[in-house]
Image (cartoon, rainbow, N blue to C red):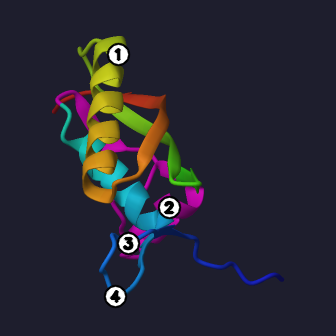
Amino acid sequence: MEKETERSTGLQGEAGQIGEVRIADDVVASIAGLAALEVDGVASMSGNATDELLSKVGVRGAGKGAKVEVIDRIVSVEMAVNLKYGYNIPAVSAKIQEKVKSAIETMTGLTVSDVNIRIAGVVMNG
């Protein structure tokens, strides 16, 4: 079995800095997940079966449901979310895209090319 390596994005430092800053892709995914959860109408992130199993044994991550790919400082995000019942899906999706793009670009200095949203479910309140 091939060992999985942790992917990270090297960021070039400003002139005069003494080193290099690397941001793990999981960190970018966490930023995306946290930003999405701040949008009114989002109930939760939706992960794959592995994420669900890990959360049941106590391993939790804000990046659950978010997958990022970083190539040459350009970020592509794919995420799956559960929305609250009664909210306008296109409007909430657009707000998620704006919020995620802004959060990643502000916090990392990377450029977001696209934020693709998959609505995985609708959650009834109470």
**Position of 18 relative to 105 (above/below):** below
Which of the labelled discs sits on residue 89, or is there none?
1
Ranked by sequence position, the earlier of labels 4 and 2 is 4
Residue 16 is situated, as x and y percent measured from the top left of the image, at 30, 80
Question: On the image, which quarter does residue 101 sit in?
Answer: top left
Marks 4/3 in contact by CB < 8 Å: the verdict is yes
Residue 18 image label: 4
Q: Secondary structure at mark 2?
A: helix
Query: 49 or 12: nearer the eye?
Result: 12
The tag earlier along the polypeptide, 1 or 3, is 3
Q: In this rendering, is residue 122 above or below 64? A: above
* Circle 4 residues within 10 Å: few <14, some 14–19, many ≥20: few
Name which residue lies at 38% across and 85% down.
19
> Which label is found at residue 13?
3
Stretch in magenta: 40-67
Which is closer to the viewer, label 1 or label 4? 4
- Residue 100 x, y percent position in the rendering: 32, 40
Q: Residue at x 31, y 81 (%)?
A: 17
Residue position marked by numbered label 2 in the rendering: 51
User: Horizontal and vertical percent for residue 20?
Assistant: 42, 80
Q: Amino acid at mark 2?
A: Asp
The amino acid type of the residue labelled 4 equals Ile
CA gap, disc 4 to disc 3?
8 Å
